[in-house]
Image (tube, rainbow, N blue to C red):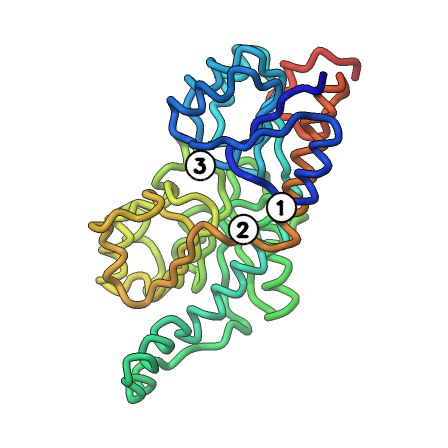
Amino acid sequence: MKPVVLLTHAIHPDAMRRLAEEAEVRVATDVDEASLCLQIAQASGLIVRTPLTPAVIQAGTRLKVVARHGVGLDYIPVATCTELGIPVVFTPNANTESVAEHVVGAMIALAHYFGPADRAVRGHAWARREGMIGLDLSGRTVGVLGMGRIGTRVAEICRIAFNMRVLGYDPFLGNEGIKSRGAQPATFNEVLEQSEFLTLHMPLSDSTRHILNADAFRQIRQGTFLINAARGGLVDTVALAEAMRAERVRGAALDVLEDEPPLPQNPLLSIDNIIFTPHSAALTQEALLRMGMDATEEVMRVLRGERPLNCANPQTLRLEA
């Protein structure tokens, strides 16, 4: 009998077909906690595309592996999985190029006022062009907060394509590590004070939540452009709104928000020079295929008793090295 693998949402069709070769594939009908607790009861594997509570994992009494369709492990209660001896696997290489391209595209769109300019034309306000004088990226300074795979790729594109000065900050890397990834090492405050473009590439944790808060925005270079395609919780929503109204931040491109989808009272929704996208930076054909296939193969490796390639809690693996 094939093991049951539950998906919180459907994944790429090619990955679904590959998974069906070795497992009975079930797609959750609802993803609220109560529904998932019922649906996970028979599952040996779980592929995740939405945040889960510990209760869902605890209800999966047959679970042998949990896979993140993507990179952000904040969607999965890893500590609960570890306590229960369940490996958590993920797909760290699948969306690097797609998100990096999105970030650089957002930088160009902000610098050239794509969002407000589009709204001006649609609103028959052609004369607004005189108040939307953009700037070139070439030779500017970009600050990269988090020099992981995506941050490193963004740094490379900015440096090579636009001859930008790249400042890098990463509390988990030393100066030599940051240099080896193509950035000039800088402190957090130096990045804030010197960057004309600031892009976030950090995981969300207790130490990084609201890393851009009111104090940070008071230190930020006047007129900085902000791009966040990492996690909404890295930025204090109210503090960003205040910084934009004070023109400390000239424009922002936000693929992620603290509340997704945004609540009607979110103060950012009424600010003009923000480009919003619905957490879709990684939603390209190529990235979805890579994420789906990588998650599928990792799940099947564990269910076959093999060692996965990328495991967030390797202490749960009872396999030969």
Instruction: Check disc 2 and report the residue beneath it.
Output: 168
Q: Residues within 10 Å of mark 3 (few under 14, many from 20)?
A: some
User: Which residue type carries mark 2?
Assistant: Gly
Which circle's residue, 1 or 3, is located before the other in the chain? 1
At 63% from the left and 29% from the top, the residue drawn is: 25
Is 110 located above or below residue 8 in the figure?
A: below
Q: Tell me the element at label 1.
A: helix
Mark toward the start of the polypeptide (1 vs 2): 1
The residue to which callout 3 is attached is 204
Residue 5 percent coordinates (x, y): 61, 25
Q: Which mark is residue 235?
A: none
In the rendered image, the quadrant that contains the C terminus is: top right
Crowd rating for badge 1 (residues with CA inside 10 Å; few <14, some 14–19, many 20+): some
Would you name the residue on which mark 1 appears? 149
Quadrant of the rendered image containing residue 291: top right
Name the amino acid type tagged 3. Leu
Tell whether 282 sits left or right of 271: right
Report, in whole angstroms, how far the alpha carbon at label 3 lies from the one at label 2. Answer: 18 Å
Tell me the element at label 3: loop
Q: How many numbered marks are there?
A: 3
Q: Residue furthest left?
A: 265
Give the secondary structure at mark 2: strand
- Please determine whether, in this image, residue 112 is positioned above or below residue 61: below
Earlier sequence position, callout 3 versus callout 2: 2
160 shown above or below 1:
below
Decide if residue 261 is on the left or right side of residue 136.
left
Give how far apart the Cα atoms at labels 1 and 2 are: 13 Å
